[in-house]
Amino acid sequence: MSLTSSSTSTEAPKIPVWLADGLAALSVVLVLIPQSLAYAELAGMPPYYGLYAAALPPIAAAFFASSIYLQTGPTALTGILTFGALASVFSPASSEFVLAASLLALAVGLWRVAIGVFKLGAIAYFMSQPVLRGFTTAAALLIISSQLPSAVGVSPPSGTVVEELLWTLTRVSSWQPLALLMAGLSAVIIIISKRLSPLLPGVFVAVVMTTLLSRVVNYNGPVVGSVNVARVPITLPWQVMRNLAGETSWTALLGLLPQLLVSGLVIAVVGFAEATSIARAFAAETRSRWNPNQEFISQGVANIASSFVSSFPVGGSFSRSALSRTAGAKSRWNGAITGALVFGALPLMPLLARLPNAVLAAIVIVSVSKLVRFKPMLTLWRLSRPQFVTAWLTFVATLLLSPRLDYAILVGIGASLLIHLYRQMQLRVSSYYDDDSLYVVPSGVLWFGSVQRFEDAMDRLLESNVSISSIVIDGRSLGHVDLSGAMAIVDSLQDAEENGISIEIQGLSDRMMRIIEELRLEQH
């Protein structure tokens, strides 16, 4: 008699990809809709334009994205960069500002697509970490400062962010207690919900509660207002240009285009840094591949789509992308579903007419507060003094040059390049004797910028060592030798031969040795 036993194992049913993406997209939408209103106002746009930037761009990006989780739409960084690029030319929220923002989104999109198509995605790494640290911290402070007047319910005279902040802080008696209550309540709800669970839509809950409270107490401060957004305005670029020329003039438009192109390039690269960090981090955690060139194309197409709906530049959101991953997104199409859900929600937006602007300010302040990070900038003093200077120079430039933050970025990049060039020019040449041979050990990079140091050192050694019979150039400590460096070595060989001294070269690559031999043959 034999006994047989059978065991059955039950596995939890797998959720279909489309359902997982749909649930993740729903979680994102509950945060995206309020954030899009807040970030549009930060960008100097009427708040409801943020809904357009949250609808079509994620759908367009999904067709080209390489990251599963990257959520495209309005962000605080692209918002403040947009404001900085246009606020000195047009009055925020004016029709001219809106049209110019649409052209700026088109410029950002074309730059990003071009970078991706020509496989120049590595340009995203040209901004060094010290520059990014200095810029993002200063930009976050500017964003918080710009939102403080709305959070306390005052309207300072038009001026720079610092001027408006000082005006607000010196008139505490003018603060509106109810606006401050709305902003404070929203901030508390958002912060507590994040601590309880990343899946809790604290931003959405704060918006619903404060909108209802605004109706109950008959809040009389600035509100979003009743706007019919059910119909998305589709405007082609040449129509935007014609309309902007009608508002100003063709001469003014032609004068504006170079500025839009430069600002568009800065936003295209700087704004992509956030998307880069998101996609790289998630790709490393999930051991999946990520293509920066493909992502540049994706983000570029998203910005072109944003320009078609008369909206402003968009980017990848770290908080919404993290939420998408936590909520269980399975494919890049969850971004498209997110955009489709925003489209579906547009007819309901008039329900937010009584939403206080103080709440939008609180959403922005809480979102960007995590970007204020002084500790990493101070740590640079111990790690690298030149990079410490670069970070703090970028930080100060960002504050002083506001609202032209694109200029501050260029200052930071310029400082980084100058420091890099200075270091590359620091060629060191040491020497020692062994019998009647002189060993010369250059270290660093031997290129056209440092050739003079090498030539001067060799001339001094040849003049002061007439009794030696040979020189050995040990190139193992050279990081790189360019053509000018190779020509300098050949010139040293010729000088030594004229003085009856033989030179031996060690430690250079086979390719460089072949170049030196060819140069020597040309001399003879």
Image (cartoon, rainbow, N blue to C red):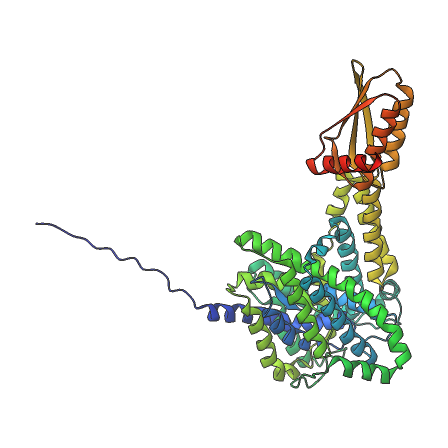
Rendered position, 203 above or below 347: above
Q: Nearer the viewer, residue 513 or 200?
A: 513
Residue at 86 percent across and 25 percent down: it is 496
Q: Quadrant of residue 487?
A: top right
Work out which quarter of the rendered image holds the C terminus and state it. Answer: top right
Q: Furthest-left residue in view?
A: 1
Rendering coords of residue 99 (x, y %): 79, 79
Residue at 80 percent across and 61 percent down: it is 142
Q: Nearer the viewer, residue 27 or 272?
A: 272
Q: Nearer the viewer, residue 179 or 444?
A: 444
Rendering coords of residue 309 (x, y %): 70, 79
Q: Is residue 27 visible?
A: no
Q: Nearer the viewer, residue 296 or 9?
A: 296
Rendered position, 326 above or below 386: below
Residue at 66 percent across and 66 percent down: it is 297
Q: Quadrant of residue 26?
A: bottom right
Q: Furthest-front residue in view?
A: 524
Rendering coords of residue 430 (x, y %): 81, 25
| Residue 91 as seen in the image, left or right of residue 118 | right
Rendering coords of residue 462 (x, y %): 88, 23
| Residue 450 as seen in the image, left or right of residue 13 | right
Residue at 57 percent across and 61 percent down: it is 198
Rendered position, 282 above or below 238: above
Q: How many marks?
A: 0
Q: Quadrant of residue 450?
A: top right
Q: Is residue 334 visible?
A: yes
Rendered position, 83 above or below 486: below
